[in-house]
Image (cartoon, rainbow, N blue to C red):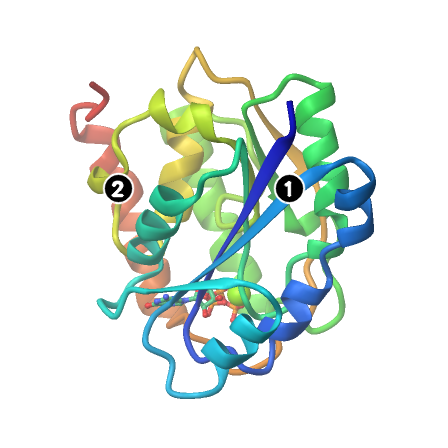
Amino acid sequence: MILKVSIVIPALNEERGIGKTILAINKDYFKKHKWELEIIIVDGGSKDKTREIALNKGAQVLTETRRGYGRAYKIGLTHATGDIIVTGDADATYPFNAIHEYIQMLIDEHLDFITTDRFAALKHGSMSLKHRFGNLTLAWTLRILFLVNIRDSQSGMWIIRRDALTKIQSLETFNDGMPFSEEIKIEMFTNRHIKAKEIPSTLSAREGQVKLESFKDGIKNLRFLFIKRITPSKHI
Ligand SMILES: Nc1nc2c(ncn2[C@@H]2O[C@H](COP(=O)(O)OP(=O)(O)OP(=O)(O)O)[C@@H](O)[C@H]2O)c(=O)[nH]1
Ligand SMILES: [Mg+2]
């Protein structure tokens, strides 16, 4: 049976990073291993050349003009048809050049979910001290509240066996904003039917303008963790 891989990337005005992000994928490895590749960009109504560049590089472009990182993922993950889904930002920060290795690891180790630890090798200029502190606080809070042992609660690169999405709460019930990232990790790591792992990865400096509002999003993410902790599980 041929393996199909879907790449899902949310993008909002990322004309400087989107091309580089897509081109980093090692297509030769995919071909050699007969992995079918589907690239889905979820565009938030970009006003720049993001869409054109993505289409030009062979991606499908979906549109979700309602704001939100989580919203974009809900659409993208629902549309993905691959057996395995890989996610990441459109700003050329995540190592899309290494995803074939991560996919291979998911297969070889019979995992259902991998999240990547950006702190294992932060490249120069990729994360300010302020962001590092914020990330550290969020990761500690998540570890304490949910007893999940991960170092990087905000990493946006995940490798997901699509089947695992049917074992967690339904996608519609997920947070629409930046907390989507910590929520998917909590869902995957606290589910005893899912084999999840965090692996060392890297982060490069961003291309294009930042969308994250550090302080506001940091507080929202922190608040989200406490609320989720006391809310009854939405798992059906
Ligand atoms: N479709 C869509 N994409 C979004 C939205 N907000 C952010 N994104 C994309 O989601 C990804 C994550 O946003 P970033 O701004 O990179 O957030 P971050 O990685 O926490 O911050 P950086 O350190 O600046 O990279 C990027 O590819 C954005 O273009 C949105 O409202 N809609
Ligand atoms: Mg980013």
Q: Position of residue 202 (x, y in %)?
A: 72, 53
> Residue 89 or 155: which is nearer the viewer?
89
Q: Residue 215: x percent and y percent?
A: 36, 68
- 183 relative to 223, above or below: above
Q: Please give the count of numbered marks on the rendered protein.
A: 2
Which mark is in front, 1 or 2?
A: 1
Query: For the residue marked with disc 1, what is the amino acid?
Result: Glu
Q: Quadrant of ligand 1?
A: bottom left
Q: Is residue 62 above or below residue 196?
A: below
Q: How far apart are labels 1 and 2 at the CA level?
A: 28 Å
Question: Any mark on residue 17, and which?
Answer: none
Task: Give residue 72's quadrant in the image.
Answer: bottom left
Q: Is mark 2 within 8 Å of ligand 1?
A: no
Residue on which disc 2 sits: 174
Q: Is residue 232 left or right of residue 42?
A: left
- Residue shown at 62%/78% (left/top)? 207
Name the residue that disc number 1 marks: 36
